[in-house]
């Protein structure tokens, strides 16, 4: 297949994105119109294509990211139920701290909450040393990928945890905001990344316990 001129960097064409949009529209029938779903799919692709380092995976992550964004929009508008607390972890690149925090939170909280992560300036891929350090304690990052921070995921969150992203995260009333002062693991040796992982894990376990007690 040949790249479509309006979608540079993707080894695909409009037909691939249309197939993604049709599948997504089936998931959100009665919630969003077909044109709305198609717009989110293309917006998701364009956002990811700006930083993706391996473009062969773009169709897969585009579908996942578009689905996540559509779900967040529907939740924030009350169009989908949110029976569990929604927790969002944000850092600069979504390639280290926020990814580790999200994976650790899934591990520690189990099915007690839903978790997302995002970056104010996402990188092309997750740091491999971060992947190794997370896997050592059973936190799975194998299918995760850096993704941009959007207004939709902030609006859908109940708890927003920021880690070094400054003022990039919008503030909305009715949400709990936490700022975790944790060092950036990117480019650090494994021993230092392990220490950062442990610092994040301590905070994650405290937050998971607080949410269970609510």
Image (tube, rainbow, N blue to C red):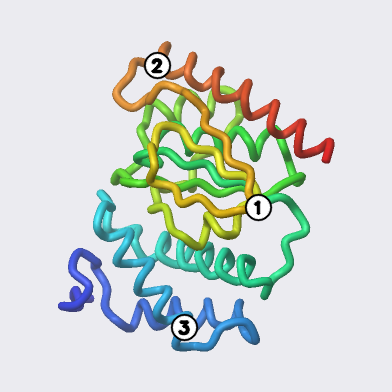
The residue under label 2 is: 190
Q: Which mark is residue 174?
A: 1
Q: Percent from the top left, x then y, of residue 101?
A: 54, 34
Q: Residue furthest front?
A: 173
Q: Nearer the viewer, mark 3 or mark 1?
A: 1
Residue in the image at 40% along x and 41% along y:
94
Image quarter hosting the C terminus: top right
Residue in the image at 40% along x and 32% along y:
164
Q: Secondary structure at mark 3?
A: helix
Contact, CB < 8 Å: mark 2 with mark 3?
no
Contact, CB < 8 Å: mark 1 with mark 2?
no
Q: Residue furthest left?
A: 5
Quadrant of the rendered image containing residue 26: bottom right
The residue under label 3 is: 36
Q: Earlier in the sequence, mark 3 or mark 1?
A: 3
Residue in the image at 24% along x and 68% along y:
11
Image quarter hosting the N terminus: bottom left
Residue in the image at 63% along x and 29% along y:
204
Q: Earlier in the sequence, mark 1 or mark 2?
A: 1
Looking at the picture, does residue 185 appear above or below residue 117?
Answer: above
Q: Residue furthest top?
A: 191
Within-10-Å neighbours for mark 2: few <14, some 14–19, many 20+: some
Within-10-Å neighbours for mark 3: few <14, some 14–19, many 20+: few
Q: How many angstroms separate mark 3 from mark 1 (CA)?
A: 27 Å
Q: Percent from the top left, x then y, of residue 155?
A: 56, 59
Between residue 11 and residue 174, name the one nearer to us. 174
Quadrant of the rendered image containing residue 5: bottom left
Q: Residue furthest right?
A: 213
Q: How many angstroms separate mark 1 from mark 2 (CA)?
A: 38 Å
36 with respect to 88 (left or right): left
Q: Secondary structure at mark 2?
A: helix
Q: Which mark is residue 111?
A: none
């Amino acid at each position: 297949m040949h790249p479509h001129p309006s979608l540079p960097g993707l080894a695909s064409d409009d037909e691939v994105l249309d197939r993604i949009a049709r599948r997504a529209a089936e998931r959100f029938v009665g919630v969003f119109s077909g044109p709305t779903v198609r717009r989110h799919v293309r917006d998701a692709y364009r956002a990811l294509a700006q930083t993706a380092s391996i473009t062969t995976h773009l169709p897969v992550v585009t579908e996942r990211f578009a689905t996540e964004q559509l779900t967040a929009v529907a939740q924030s508008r009350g169009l989908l139920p949110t029976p569990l607390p929604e927790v969002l972890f944000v850092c600069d690149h979504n390639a280290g701290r926020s990814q580790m925090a999200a994976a650790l939170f899934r591990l520690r909280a189990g099915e007690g909450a839903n978790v997302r992560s995002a970056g104010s300036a996402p990188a092309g891929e997750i740091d491999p040393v971060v992947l190794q350090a997370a896997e050592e304690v059973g936190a799975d990052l194998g299918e995760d990928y850096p993704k941009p921070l959007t207004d939709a995921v902030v609006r859908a969150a109940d708890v927003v945890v920021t880690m070094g992203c400054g003022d990039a995260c919008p503030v909305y009333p009715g949400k709990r905001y936490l700022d975790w002062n944790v060092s950036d693991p990117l480019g650090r040796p494994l021993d230092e990344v392990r220490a950062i992982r442990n610092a994040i894990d301590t905070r994650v376990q405290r937050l998971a316990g607080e949410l269970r007690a609510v």
